[in-house]
Image (tube, rainbow, N blue to C red):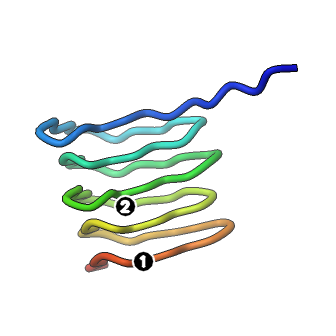
Amino acid sequence: MKTELNITLIAPGYAITGDMVVDHGVSCFGLLDSGIISTQGLLHVGEGGLLKGMAQGEHVRIDGRVDGDVHARGSLEVNGQVCG
């Protein structure tokens, strides 16, 4: 059986306003001006990415900046900045 990899990409230069809830992984290299919940997979704020709001995920990796609270159910790795 083939396993599908589902990831939502917020590319550099893109901005999203409004809360997001996804059932797969997310990589944010742009601006997400809201909260985000990822129920499965990796929630990644990449280098140059900015999240203004709450981040909640199974596995969370911050290489950019989060201005809000961060909640990880499995693992949390912070190489960037978190102000929350």
Of the pair 73 and 76, the residue shown nearer to us: 76
Of the pair 6 and 52, the residue shown nearer to us: 6
Of the pair 16 and 48, the residue shown nearer to us: 48
What amino acid is labelled 2 in the image? Met
**What residue sits 20% from the left and 46% below the top?**
30
What amino acid is labelled 1 in the image? Val
**What residue sits 30% from the left and 77% below the top?**
82
Q: Residue furthest front?
A: 2
**What residue sits 57% from the left and 30% below the top?**
6
Report the disc number at residue 78. 1
Q: Is residue 36 above or below residue 16?
A: below
Closer to the chain start, of discs 1 and 2, is 2
Secondary structure beneath dot 2 equals loop
The residue that mark 2 highlights is 54
Secondary structure beneath dot 1 equals strand
The x and y percentages for residue 3 are 76, 27
- Is 49 displayed left or right of 56 in the figure? left
Q: Residue furthest left?
A: 13
The x and y percentages for residue 4 are 68, 25
Q: Quadrant of the C terminus?
A: bottom left
- Is 30 displayed left or right of 61 in the figure? left
